[in-house]
Image (cartoon, coloured by chain):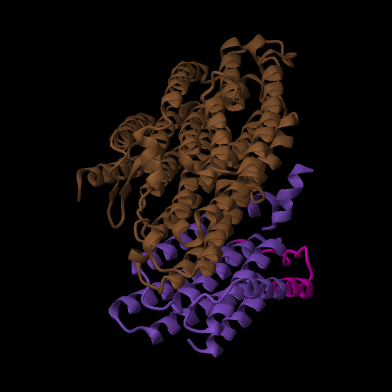
Chain colours: A purple, B brown
Amino acid sequence: MTAGFSWAMVALGIGVVVFRRRSVAVGLVTTQALLLALEALRDASSARDAAAALALGARGVALAVFFWLLVHRTRETRPVRAGTEPLARGGAAVALALVLVWLIPDLGLDSAAAERSALTLVALGLVTAATRRATVFQVLGIVLVENGLAVAALALPGSSSLAIEIGITVDLLLIAVVAGVFHERIFAEFGAGDSAALGSLRG
Amino acid sequence: MANREWLAVAVLATPAAGVVLSALVPQRALARVAMVTAIAAGSVSATLATVALADPGSPQLGRWIVVDAAGGLLVGVIGIVGLASTLVSPPVLGHGHGSLFRPLRAERVYWVTLFAFWTVLLAVPLAANLGAAWLAIEATTAASALLVGFSGRARALEAGWKYLILTSLGLGVALLGILVLTAAAGGGGLETLTWRSLPHATLDPDVTLVAYVLLLAGLAAKIGWAPVHNWLPDAHSEAPAPVSALLSAALLPAVLLVAWRSQQALAPTIGAHTAGSVLVAFGLVSLAVAVPFLWRSQAWKRLLAYSSLEHMGVIALGIGFGGPLALAGVTVHIVGHAIAKALGFYAATPLLGHEPRASGHAVGGIGRTQPALGASLGISLGALAGLPPSPLFVSEVLIVAGGFQAGRPWAAGAAAILLALGFLGLAHALIDTVIGKPRRRDRDAAPGLRAVTALTAVAVAALLALTVAALWLPGSGIVDGLLRGLA
């Protein structure tokens, strides 16, 4: 895995943290997923590796179609305001990434760049889910975390289990579909996919 | 495959058949087919549990499936709670309120999702490796989130959403731990992560400790251990009562079993004391966070939810202490908590019919206005509080004694104090709920009360039998089997 690929993944992830529009963020996450599939295919040395790469590609395409449909079906008059400003979100994400990289010792992945990029993507995903109010962005946070874990899985020494990788792909798609059901119902109930509207119920 | 493995496949196949049948049969036959399938699934699970516990010294460990004493115990609990939840579901579905799904489809979606949740839940204790166990746990999230938000009420949407996002993120962190562990083992596929191979793997202790902490921190979000328990009170309050029972009595301990297996598998590398200390810390923090909420006046299901936080903390302490006394306590606690907590949630359906304000407020004097319902609530709360002769009294004594036996007097002492405080809080709630000042004068029939009364009689017999068994358990073959684990 090249350093350029690792840092391209991080740059796309930072875009998800700071950009305002859902459609842009969906595009960035989809690009990440397709880059992952291409990198996996480039590194594939057996039919099993190629099948795992195809599973990653299928996941990327399925998620892209799913999110596009979701955004299309729940058009908002204007983007949901995030509780935190973009600069603060980006700062929090970078700070958490640095803490994770500092705290976690050498993991034994193929390259140091892959390790840092995996941990940074996990941090970006956690910060996205914690600081964005829009429900679609919270799900994209989970996808970012999973993309970070996919980077780590690609950089594992030796071969990984195809069954587990396909299982993780199916699980992520299931979670996304269930989140989609909730998002549509929340949109129908409140007129916006805004998780802050849910919190206000307790007031 | 050996006989036990075939039995384990049957355990998974029976509720899976329930998914298919619920999707296909005509609407009018839905409930009946669900009952028959549930009786079959509960019976097969109970059979596997009996077989596994009758011969705890020789666990069956394949590539994908494990059948051992701990797994058998959990399969039995999940099977019985799943069966009881199915039996008490019709009154919940029959109340005619709205749903997350279209009215014509709602009942069918409920049964399909309930059986899907039950199936993946049974897969958790039967999974022979960490990767497969993680997959099963993640799959429980997708199915159960739909059930949590099933009523479609705004608060249920909030609870379901919070549950979905927080537990998915937590499981992402747990997966990071699994990847770190795989890297530490030098890569490889499923074989690296089996419960049998992990204790013998050559791993770097520092990296393994990081993996273990990440894994437990991630699983904690699903188990509901403090401080990552925020979804738990809302989800337990808003889910339909039979689902709340499955979440609390079956899901939480099933995921806890994976934490337990991880501790046993990684202890040879990071040290048994260190591995236990992480669990003891989660246990004490959960107890400390739960106790103030047990002292407050709470809505019935919310009170039960905070009691889940307390009891998952107690089980974590028992596993962390290790040793024969503590593990005997853990065994009794898992079963006793499941019986008492499930009964409490089942009683919520007639309670809400009798006193609709109970969904958001504490209730009082139910024993005066509805004696049978008051008895169900009282027995559940009394058992959960650890009021003798509750088996949870015996299990808590065993766990605290196990802490002293394990050379952790400070943790055991702190646990004893927190348990006493928790007992006082629940005892106060018990008095208020059952014989306190009633807030409602009329005595309307409560929906589903007959089924709950019958289940109460069964629960009382089971709790008393468990108390007797608890006195015999320390030093038995079952505890020996639990101590040995799968190594």
Percent across and percent down for residue A184 are 59, 55
Q: Considering the whole magenta stretch, tell me its main secondary structure.
A: loop
**Residue B442 vs residue A187, the one in the foreground:** B442
Residue at position x 65%, y 10% in the image? B369
Q: Is residue B78 magenta?
A: no
**Residue B286 vs residue B81, the one in the foreground:** B286
Q: Which residues are magenta?
A: A74-93
Percent across and percent down for residue B262 are 46, 54
**Residue B19 vs residue A102, the one in the foreground:** A102
Q: In the image, A153: left or right of B10?
A: right
Give residue A12's quadrant in the image.
bottom right
Residue at position x 55%, y 77% in the image? A106
Q: Is residue A78 magenta?
A: yes
Percent across and percent down for residue B183 are 45, 73
Residue at position x 35%, y 33% in the image? B42
**Residue A21 vs residue B1, the one in the foreground:** B1
Is residue B305 among the parts visible in the rendering? yes
